[in-house]
Amino acid sequence: MNFQLSDDQRAIKRTARDLLASRYRPETVRELADDERGFTDEQWLELAELGWPGVIVPEADGGLGLGAIELVVIQEEIGYALAPTPLLSTVSAALLLVAAGDQEQRSRWLPSLAAGETRGTVAVWDERSGWAPDGSELESVDGRLTGTKVAVADAASAEFVIVAGADARHSLVRSDDPGAEIAPERSLDPTRKFYTVKLSGACADQLRAGDGERITRAYATIVTAVAAENVGVAQRALEMAVAHAKDRKQFGRAIGSYQAVSHRCAQMLLEVEGARSLCYWAGWALDHDPAVAVRAASMAKAYASDAGFRVTAAALQVHGGIGFTWEHDLHFFLKRAKANGHAFGDGRWHRDRVAELSGI
Amino acid sequence: MDLTLSPSEQAFRDELRAWLEANHPGALPREEQGSFEFRRAWQRRLHDAGWAGISWPERYGGRGASLIEQAIFNEEIVRARTPQLANVLGLAMGGPTVIAHGTEEQRQRYLPPILSADEIWCQGFSEPESGSDLASLKTRATRSGDGWVITGQKVWTTYAQHAKWCMLLARTNPDAPRHQGLSYFLMDMEQEGVQVRPLRQITGEAEFNELFLEQARVPESNIIGGEGNGWAVAITTLMHERATLAFGLQVSVQIALQELVEHAERSPGSNGRAAAADPLVRQRLAQLMIEAEVLRLNAYRGLSATMQGGVPGPEGSLAKWHWSEVNQALTELAMDISGVRALAIEGDGVGDNNWTYRFLRARANSIEGGTTEILKNIVAERVLGLPRMR
Ligand SMILES: Cc1cc2nc3c(=O)[nH]c(=O)nc-3n(C[C@H](O)[C@H](O)[C@H](O)COP(=O)(O)OP(=O)(O)OC[C@H]3O[C@@H](n4cnc5c(N)ncnc54)[C@H](O)[C@@H]3O)c2cc1C
């Protein structure tokens, strides 16, 4: 029994922390938030050189063949830096391809995804389905898809979209397909670009090999990665709040000496550490304990969804008026945390899953 | 990272499990004194088989077990639903404190009877005027001949009625700065100067007591850690209280949660369906399952960190605070599920087969062993490095 990251995992974490801190300084994040595309080729290539797009893609498919825990570690640092990057979208597309693509589809796409030469994304939510991530009713006629998908991250910069259809069938649609129209949305979280993807008889290459269980596990990995990002986001917000509470003086003393402030910070720590424990556990279970992995992932996502928002909101409160300004960075963290909280099933949906998987 | 038990850890667990299964003493008798003697006998049986104080050094009757084995032990003993050991305070706090700060003579003298439950321990820290602000305590120890004479009052002293020894914190130097004027004594409870008066609790039971000390005598050899060092020694006791109990507590929450799910499945909710079918109840149950998992994982994470770093850190405060919230939320949900049935206390109203009792007992969780507010202060100041509150 050992709950510490291995030396290799720690090395990945340290590299990620240092690199992301130098490449995504607050000014850079701010510029990218205003930028239409949201990242530069240089930035992408650098992450690709580290192998991150293929971190969890098997070596046989051109990836690094590492585990979910390594993905968790990287995602935590992406969140900590609040790096605007299409990495998660590409990793998610890769996970679904690994889970459900047949040999031909895998060899067509995975090596170039893993190398960072191609980017993909995942389109889950129908315009009119509820917030459940598994409720698509997309129409499919003779291999052509019609319907509208919303909140598709990084679609404009991706070569293809993995589209979720009815009965957990997934298909690959190329972004330049004449039947696919990609229109930017105004994102709650400006550090991640979201799009509406309108399909009108778009040519769809259905992923032919996946069974329900493999797809469920792919989603469990994705939600764990999203949850891990929120751990990093919340950790950074906590650190900002604590620094501010030590620094800011009112009534002649640091506001951190008031319990209404310090106890709020202690509560933030409790929630950050809880979310971190759950994410590491879920990552580990996805690699080593499949029997509990899906339930663990839902636990992590439920907890990190709520904690991400609560911690960033608490940090804002600790900052007072300055925290409410556009000029301060905190709002980017709050928005990322909230957006992540809603993506791939919110806290309520995942709690319901936990209940179901626990036989209640 | 590896969250599975190693083969040797697993072998240890299996051996313990088998032993507990074969030696489970059965249900606790209801009546107070009888139930305590039952628990004493149960601890003795464990001790005879070498299962008491396993992490203590072998020369004091332990088996030098690793931290992880101690953690497994704390989990398994709760999982087996055996009665609580009679000498919990001696095992969890007194022994570790004597091991850390006692002289070799004191270790030889006091440790073995803690394990065998021949001598029960209690903790005399809190006073009527000094609860959270423990260092303000007034109980006075003055030198007399080759020992000390102690006068004052303690309160909330759990198991004082059964105890042979009291971990007593008293002021030996009223002129020193308040943290430096304290000393840590082992006081013999069996003497005229010590009067124990039971305090009835919210549940109707009397686990804890008032302690009146009038010229109680303690020999010089019964100071732990030396005169004037009582505060540091007391902190060790409190750290152990918070750290070592975490494993047992998280398992007891897991067990309570299973029982709560059964309760929800058996109890009627609205529309003629079981309470468990109510979406709000489901949400709260799932949230509790998640929180219980956090308690378990944090305990393991803390253990891994301690195995690398040595001593338990202030993170134990976080665990104890979180546990109290989860356990209170759990029993509150149980009451909500009971609905109007919660108004009646079933049976004799004592013990873990009764949700109303558990709900009432859980009220103490955020007070005993340090209130939640104090634990938050500790986390804010010692973990986050925020300025001291005034
Ligand atoms: C079931 C049970 C068993 C116990 N067993 C023992 C035992 O065996 N031995 C022993 O010595 N003691 C024991 N105690 C006592 C326990 O340690 C004290 O009750 C506890 O430390 C709180 O002290 P108090 O009750 O005097 O409350 P107070 O310290 O008066 O606190 C009252 C309220 O004020 C808050 N408060 C106090 N100071 C601050 C502050 N600085 N900032 C913010 N809020 C503050 C507290 O959090 C609390 O909400 C037991 C208590 C219980 C409930």
Image: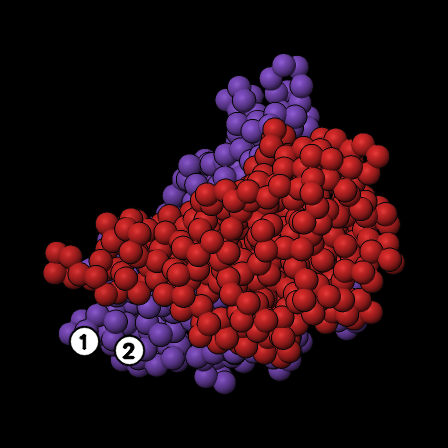
The kind of residue tagged 2 is: Gly
Residue bearing mark 2: B228
- Where's residue B370, x and y in %? 38, 56
Q: Amino acid at mark 1?
A: Ala
Q: Is mark 1 within 8 Å of ligand 1?
A: no
The spot of residue A211 in percent (x, y) is 84, 46
Quarter of the picture holding the C terminus of chain A: top right
Whether residue B256 is situated above or below residue B61 in the rendered picture: above
Residues under numbered marks 2 and 1 in contact, where contact means CB atoms less than 8 Å apart: yes
The percent position of residue B343, horizontal first and vertical second, equals 50, 22
**Residue found farthest to the front:** A178
Q: In the rendered image of this protein, which colour is used for chain B?
A: purple
**Residue at the spot of label 1:** B176
Which of the marked residues, 2 or 1, is nearer the chain's N terminus? 1
Above or below, comparing residue A321 to residue A83 in the picture: above
Residue A292 is tagged as none
Dot 1 crowding, Cα within 10 Å, few <14, some 14–19, many 20+? few
